Image (tube, rainbow, N blue to C red):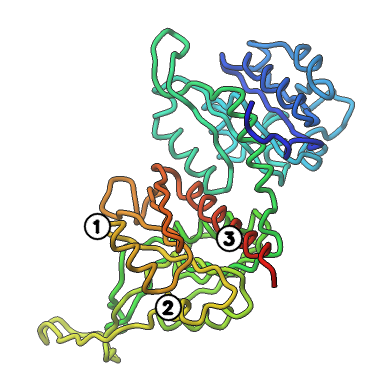
Amino acid sequence: MHSDLTPLRGRRVVLGVSGGIAAYKAVEICRQLVEAGAFVSPVLTGDAQRFIGALTFSALASEPARTSLFGEADTIPHTLLGQRAHLVIVAPATAKLLGKYASGISDDLLTATLLATRAPVLLAPAMHAEMWEHPAVVDNVALLERRGVAFVGPGNGQLAGGDEGPGRLADPETIVATAAEVLARGHDLAGVRLVVTAGGTREPIDPVRFIGNRSSGKMGHAIADAAARRGAAVTLVTTSALDAESSVERVSVARAEEMHDAVMARYAECDAVVMAAAVADFRPKVVADQKIKKHDGPPEVVLEATPDILAVLGERKEHQVLVGFAAETEHLREHAAAKLAAKHVDLMVANDVAAPDCGFEVDTNQAVLLDSNGRAEELPLQSKADLADAVLDRIRDVLEHRGEEPS
């Protein structure tokens, strides 16, 4: 194995095994985790034991496998496991397991442990292709990703029954390497002060109508939530009503000028700003005091520019890492590169909002990351939660590099 498995050394890992034919592969995952230096506590569901015996895991793991909420030496094994764990892995994670976890159902030791832990959770799904593609499973995966759960796989390949398709459990080496990556992220942003903007601003025409855009705020909220889980002190300036992690400081705004004021009030003290919000470029010069009536005919709306928050941040940038977003419909890289240079941005996240499953109001995105050194990295279509971590990885790397420079 070429991956760096150092983050696993000395860590307590709960290895959950649910009832799928791929359960036998969890034995190799267990062996590799122990070999990497992790303290592994296996937890098998009743269905898992139809495919593989608990004794096999007990022989390979760091302690005997657990199989029940009741009758164990510990009176509250799920609490003990959940509180001690540095990471919980479930491989395979069946459609049944995903559904119960997403719904908060805890009717066995494994699901109870998942609800009782604050440690990162890594799920490795495995099921037949039709099950993996079923809308209920798709929704459950999206919900868990929004909550910060990490996924690895599934891959394409031969499935039980002889046919092929998506749903095959990721290779044990890949699962173990991903586990190390999840642990490495851990609290890698501890001490970082981050401001994130989210949502589309609304510029009033009258007390009822406004100029706005389709931004839902999902991308900005995903970045704020992921940063908070990774230890950053996060302020989220948002126009959206979406929930956020409890540790995130939330500042609700509506107009571009309000967002400008909220960000600028915190700029001097922060380490990085992620301008994920879709800020309106223009606003009505005059706002009607009362609702404009249709019988008066179409109003003449004269527009003026709103504050260019990203440009102002770029002009006043000192030590901060500045990240911008470029939502484009054509000439993606050219327009994003021009915006990056003009506004003195460190990293530009460019995405084609006209492409399928990208941009506004969806849970996925595909982006190109352009930096001030002229590098461009094209990312695959992925969840906004995964894209959030990719952006935060780049911020972390810039901050670490700056920390190495002589003062």
Q: Which quadrant of the figure contains the C terminus?
A: bottom right
Q: CA distance from mark 1 to mark 2?
A: 23 Å
Q: At label 2, which amino acid type do we have?
A: Ile
Residue at screen point 67% across, 11% down? 52
Residue at screen point 39% across, 43% down? 381
Q: Nearer the viewer, mark 3 or mark 2?
A: 3
What residue is pinned by disc 2?
A: 309
Percent x, y of residue 237: 51, 71
Q: Residues within 10 Å of mark 3 (few under 14, many from 20)?
A: some
As drawn, is 349 to the left or to the right of 247? left
As drawn, is 126 to the left or to the right of 282? right
Q: Earlier in the sequence, mark 3 or mark 2?
A: 2
Q: Nearer the viewer, mark 1 or mark 2?
A: 1
Q: CA distance from mark 3 to mark 2?
A: 22 Å
Percent x, y of residue 131: 43, 24
Helix or strand or loop: what does disc 3 sit on?
helix
> Splitting the image into 4 quarters, where does residue 204 fall?
bottom left
Q: Residues within 10 Å of mark 1 (few under 14, many from 20)?
A: few
What residue is pinned by disc 1?
A: 331
Q: Of the numbered discs in the image, which one, if any, rests on residue 364? A: none
Which residue ends up furthest to the front in the rendered image?
A: 406
Q: At label 1, which amino acid type do we have?
A: His
Percent x, y of residue 318: 57, 78
Helix or strand or loop: what does disc 1 sit on?
loop
Q: Which quadrant of the figure contains the N terminus?
A: top right
Above or below, 6 against 231 in this view is above
Q: At label 3, which amino acid type do we have?
A: Val
What residue is pinned by disc 3?
A: 398
